[in-house]
Image (cartoon, grey):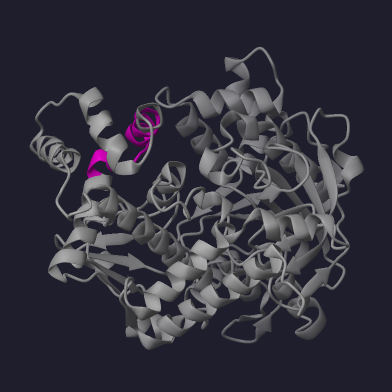
Amino acid sequence: MAVRTRAQESRAAIQRLYIAMRHLFLRGSYKPLGVSGEAMIKSLLLLKPEIYGSIADPEKVELSGLLYVFQRLPEGIEQCRFFNLIAREGLENSSFVPLVPSKRRRDCYRVDDEQMYIEMTRGRSDIYDVLTHLTFMFIEAEKIRRNSFDYRDRPKREWEMLEEIVHKIESGESYNKEMGYTYLSTILGRTYEETAEICEEFADSRKVNSLFEIAYWLGKRSIDEHVHSLDREITFSSALRENVGNHMHGEMWANDIKKFLMANNLFDRPIHVISANMHSVMNTLYAKKVVGKKTSSKSLVEMAKVLSKSKNDGMQKNLINYASANGMTFLKDDSGTNIGVQIFDLTKVDPKSVATEVTWNKKYIKKEKPLLLVFDYPFGEQAYEIMDELLKPFDDVKNKKLINVASINIMGKAGILEGGKGDIMIPTAHIFEGTADNYPFENSLKAKDFKGNGIGVYEGPMITVLGTSLQNKDILRYFHKSSWEVIGLEMEGAHFQKAIQVATKIRNSINPDATLRYAYYASDNPLETGSTLASGSLGLDGVGPTYLITSKIISGILS
């Protein structure tokens, strides 16, 4: 009998995880340490995703992975026993204060001491993301419980001292941090140095409790379940189970955009769709006018760095005000997608405010009167939902109107498999992990367009993964080293392409010759130890590739 490779075992583990999550979602609820939850835990431990580091170590608590997870879950979730995943069901109109994690756009509500409600409005990828993070959290909680008790099942002194420290934190009293690090290091199965370092990182993170509190409450909830049978439980509301996959939020989002275009007589003008962040296009078109006086260099990258560093001097506000008076409109999102939209009327942009890196074409702008429709990054499968709805014909009162899409431009961040953080990837095809869906396409951007800028550039197929938190080196090495020759991984590319090909080849709702431009900058290299997403953000290192891609996209649109 042939022996399965580690990559094959890992891929099977991912499939089991997703089958289990889908089954539990349809069932409506489960207990994380019950039979169903244990199946998910076993699959995650077999997979050993890179982002979760030492997850499979029975004693060592994974520190960077914990920080990564708690930056994406609501503050205080470690104190809860009941986790309710819901659709948008009216809580936004209640007196509950929404808790929004610092690294994920999702509204959450702490309704009492033990119960957290988490709104899921971004599709299945969002649900699977939360469930994976919660499963990891429960695995680490069990380690903390085991480390906090001796072989006779008696609490260790370190656990009792940690409890005292947490009570002092909650009452606002001072405590000796260094003593706390020594107690905590035993409970985490880590060295004093590792513990002190990660505690400082937790302290510097927004909307995340201290590691003292998180370790204590994770351990306490695990003890409550192990000793007192106070089980933890995850539930999915009936409204969520009914709504997922029906594009309810995406349809509202796209219709709001089309209604704005109709109301302002912009619907028939050439529209260049750009999926990017909410600052790079705006800064590229307007920063020189506002920030140019603040720096001797008129380089777009240098101006962007000045803006990134400025917080309280009013520069950002001045830039937004100037942009709003000169062709930019920001559409408020009331749909629940949590995806912002900016519309730029290029006929109202002063060429003197545009970055010198952009090739400005006055004749084209005067003749065609193009619009830029920029929307913020979607999440995984949500990319299909919003692009599919955006490219559909608009049901006007009188008749169906087709949106005049001249080009579709995708700028994203992705994991790179050859090269390092800050390098650029130009995809030639998107391969959808775990399926037979592969999307080759003609990318108007080429690697040669980015040469000579001091940034590494790679061109080739990219894999759209089911979740970045489920990838390990074995799977990624297989895709990189085999005949697939994949250069990177991300979560939206195949979903975008699916919607684009439906619009161009089946519905015929947009011009089949609309130009496609895709480019990604590397946020991490999961094949390198210490370079995963859990190791931290790019910071200012991401400014160069972000604005290089942005200027190339805008120049390409105007050419």
On screen, residue 314 versus residue 445, left or right, reads left
On screen, residue 393 versus residue 258, left or right, reads right
Q: Nearer the viewer, residue 313 or 66?
A: 66
Q: Can residue 294 be found in the magenta stretch?
A: no
On screen, residue 67 versus residue 208, left or right, reads right
Q: Which residue is rendered at x = 72% and y = 23% of the image?
A: 299
Among the 4 quarters of the image, the one containing residue 358 = top right
Farthest residue, direction top? 296
Q: Which residue is rendered at x = 35% and y = 28% of the image?
A: 192
- Image coordinates of residue 207 in percent, x first then y, are 32, 43
- Image coordinates of residue 451 in percent, x first then y, are 88, 35
Q: Nearer the viewer, residue 267 or 38?
A: 38
Up/down of 261 relative to 503, above or below? above
Among the 4 quarters of the image, the one containing residue 540 = top right
Among the 4 quarters of the image, the one containing residue 554 = top right
Farthest residue, direction right? 448
- Range shown magenta: 196-213
Q: Which residue is rendered at x = 81% and y = 60% of the image?
A: 516
Looking at the rendering, in which quadrant would you find the N terminus?
bottom right
- Image coordinates of residue 214 in percent, x first then y, are 27, 46
Q: Which residue is rendered at x = 59% and y = 44% of the image?
A: 532
Taken as a whole, is the magenta stretch helix, strand or loop?
helix
Q: Can residue 201 be found in the magenta stretch?
A: yes
Q: Is residue 167 visible?
A: yes
Counting labels gives 0
Up/down of 211 relative to 368, above or below? above
